[in-house]
Structures are given as C-alpha cells and as structure tokens.
Image (tube, rainbow, N blue to C red):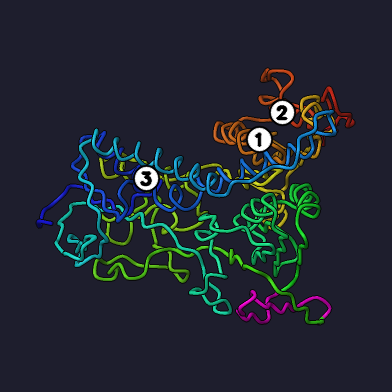
Amino acid sequence: MEDNNTQVAVIGAGPGGYAAAFLAADMGMAVTLIDPAENPGGVCLYRGCIPSKALLHVSRLIDEASHAADWGVSFGKPKIDIQRMRAWKSEIIDGLTGGLGRLVAQRKINHVRATARFMDDHTLSLADMEGKTSTLGFAHAVLATGSAAVDIPLFPADSDRIWNSKKALDLETVPTTLLVVGGGYIGLELGSVYAALGSDVTVVEMLPHLLAGADRDLVRFLARRLTDRFKAILLGTTVAAAKVQKNGVKVTFGGQDDKPLTRLFQRVLVAVGRRPRSAGLGLETAGVTLDEGGFVKIDAHCRTAAQHIFAIGDVAGQPMLAHKAAYEARIAVETIAGKNVIADPAAIPAVVFTDPEVAWTGLTESAAKTGGTAVEVTRFPWAASGRAVSLGRSDGLTKLVIDPASERLLGAGIVGPGAGELIAEATLAIEMGANATDLGLTIHPHPTLAETLKEAADIFHGTATHYYRPKRKKKNE
C-alpha cells in the first residue's frame, strides 16, 4: 500500500461504519473505508445479527410445524441437514456482503483491507492482510470498530467445547447438551436455535430474572415458553467452577440455597455481554479519551475529545445496537459536512428475536418507577386480538407507557410474534410526540396485530372495543 491522504477515514465497516462511509461519499466527500474483511458488514452481518436471525427463522419454522397438529395439520419429525443449513446461512451472508461491496465500488469509496492504528491525530498506520504497513493522512476520522464478546476466565477460550456467539453460529455440531451462560438476548436467541435443533439446553443467569433490560410483564410470556423448550433455566445462579474433560465440560453451580450443583455438558456457550473494541488503536496518541468501561467519550455530535475524530456505534457506548450505530453515523457525517445536528433520539427500539419476540422502545415501566416518573401504563392482552388468536398465538401483550397529564406516549413494549416489526410504529409515534388520542384515532387495518397498539391506546380512555376497562377519571372530575 502506498502512503496517501483522505478527507474522511472510516475505521470499521460494520452497520455504523459502512453507513458513515456511504453517506459521506453521497455528500461528495473523498472516503477511505478501512476493514480487514473482503466486503463491509462487520460483526452484525458476518457473525451476529443476520446469521442468528436466519437460524432463528429455522427454529421458529420447526416449532410452528410441531404445533400445527393443534390446527389439524400434522408433519413428520423434521429431518435436519446441518451442512445444508450452514451453506444456506453462508449464502445469505455472501449475498448481502457482496451487495455492500458493489455499493462501495459504485460510490467510488477507497476500500482498504487492513487494520488501523492512530500514529497521531491526523495519521493512521495501516497493516494489510500480508502484514505490509503504510500510512494514511486524514482530515476527519470516524471510529466504528464495534465490540467483541466478553470472555469468562473460568472457561478456557481455546477449547473447542467452549463457544462464544461466533462459534455457536458456525453450526459445526449440534451438541446433545448445551449450557448457555447468560440470560440476555444473545444467550436466549442462540439457546432457542439449538433447542429447536435437538439440544438439551440449560441457561444459567446470575440475576433473578431473564432479559434484565426489559419489563417483567413482557418477559414472563417468553420465560413461560422457554421453560417448556429448555431443559432448565437456573436463575440467581452463578458458575462456581468449570473443568474441560474429554467427555465434556464439568460445571459446578452456586447460589441455589447454597447447595453446589454439578452437571456435565458437551458444549458451553458463554454469552455474558460484549465489550467495546477500543484497546490497541493508539487512541491516546490522537487525543481520544475513554470512560471507565472502555467506551470512547463523545459529545452530542458524536465528536471525541479530538474534535475532528468521531466515534459511533458499540465503541461509543450503550445501547450496543446496529440501528443506533447507523443513526450516529448520519449525525457524525452531517456534522463533518457542517450541518448543525445532534444525536437526540426520543426512543431507540430494542428487539429480542426469540419466540415470542420481545421488543420495547422509549421509557420502560421499570425505568419510570426507578426514576420517579409519573406514568400510566395500559396493556392490551393478545388473547383479545382476533388476529393473534387466529394465528394460535394469543400468548402476547402490547403495553403503552403514557404521561397521565399530557397523554403523550413515552414508551411502549410488545411481546409476541412480529413484535420487532410492530415496535417501529410506536417508536415513530414517540418521535412525533403523539398522544394516546392520536394513536387511537389512527385507522389500523383489521384483522392485524398492529391493531393491538390502537386498542392499547383506547384503553387509556376506557374505550377499547375488544377489552373492557372502566374509563379513567381525570383529577378535576
């Protein structure tokens, strides 16, 4: 590689990085996109969001087929071809990443397959795939290096019996027994996949409940279903010891009535969270500072302490979500272009793609209670939804978190099939400052699951068609 210069250097080609590079190029800037992979995509597309959703689709299909007998349609036991499933997953990844590669070429972006390290606040040292080094000068830089899975010292990462999310998504084998360490969204999603494929799955979580970030009334529907699907769910439980043996991993648990419990598992999936990729980048030489958690400190414009260097996505703080990264990419690039914009979302949706899906956006009920915010919560049970019942999926709920004084929508939560799609309407309503009346008077198609949002809004006024709750009395009545 020859030494050169660029107007905007984007480090990392995940959902935030390639979004920043594409927008900057569309706005007429000279862009260099730096990433070791052949095409953009990052962890999300290569080893995370997309492949996991592909496998979750398979697991959901298997589960639906098993329940079809309740409706009068019976299928035989599914025959699972792991090699074909793995190939199908790879085809999806290759197609999407290849498409992004073509978009790089169409936008005339300089894509450099390399790793980057700051030499100073205007120069990067690049090491290509063959180990050759060069330098790249830049006027502006966007740091989008993402995050990596957190390891637990108890479990040796070099053992093929210990998996992180990447190894689990490789789908090399379907173990007879699988321990999932961590009851967050990654552990529950991948645990669901392997349970559908035939593994006896045990989940261990040190907290007293699953999905710590979600409201309990949403999680209970998922927990009920997973209790039937998984071999065991151990809450309020820690891993006291683990030993890799020839026949598996011997794990000792603690925390349940102080009585040690020992079990043997063929594989262990460690899914206890992710950490920002901020180490080893030479950030200190560029004047970029980190917080105690290793996240890059940024302002409302996504600027770091070095005003011409920006950070977006997982490396720049919670929530560590692909769509948050893409949003921040726009803020950073438009700031570089001289526009007066800031990152100030009223709501950032989160989705757990289990079955049922769990989604929430804006202010949660638990956060409102913790922060002392006065809210009124309305809930529409899917047992009262004609569409949900016709799908055989009445195990769901749509809830709204509303300001009782202004009636403005502050947050929403949904659990049920398709919750990840439905939550977008609630997010838009929050961003637009809609109130319960706005949502209730919006005509929704019938019969749909989307109607549950309208009905939940009508419950606020006591006028829901398919669910009775007495009309609320205002303070002056």
Q: Which mark is residue 418?
A: 1
The kind of residue tagged 1 is Gly
Q: Is 447 displayed left or right of 288 in the figure?
A: right
Name which residue type carries label 2.
Answer: Leu
Instruction: Answer with left or right where residue 13 lies relative to residue 195.
Output: left
Name the side, left or right, on which 41 lies relative to 425.
left
User: Which type of secondary structure does the marked residue at label 3 adopt?
Assistant: helix
Q: How far apart are the alpha carbons under marks 3 and 1?
A: 27 Å
Start-end of magenta stretch? 238-257
Disc 2 marks which residue? 449
Q: Residue at x 76, y 62 (%)?
A: 233
Residue 247 painted magenta? yes
- Of the two numbered discs 3 and 2 on the same chain, state the one appearing first in sequence: 3
The secondary structure type at the circle numbered 2 is: loop
Q: Local crowd at mark 3 within 10 Å, few (<14), some, or many (≥20)?
A: many
Label 3 or label 1, whichever comes before in sequence order: 3
Query: As shown in the figure, which amino acid type bears the numbered disc 3?
Result: Ala
Residue in the picture at 64% in, 62% down: 175
> Is residue 175 shown above or below 445?
below
Compare marks 1 and 2 and give the one earlier in the sequence: 1
Query: Residue tagged by mark 3?
Result: 329
- Kindly check if marks 1 and 2 are in contact, taking CB atoms under 8 A apart as contact: yes
Locate residue 284, reporting x and y percent.
Answer: 29, 71
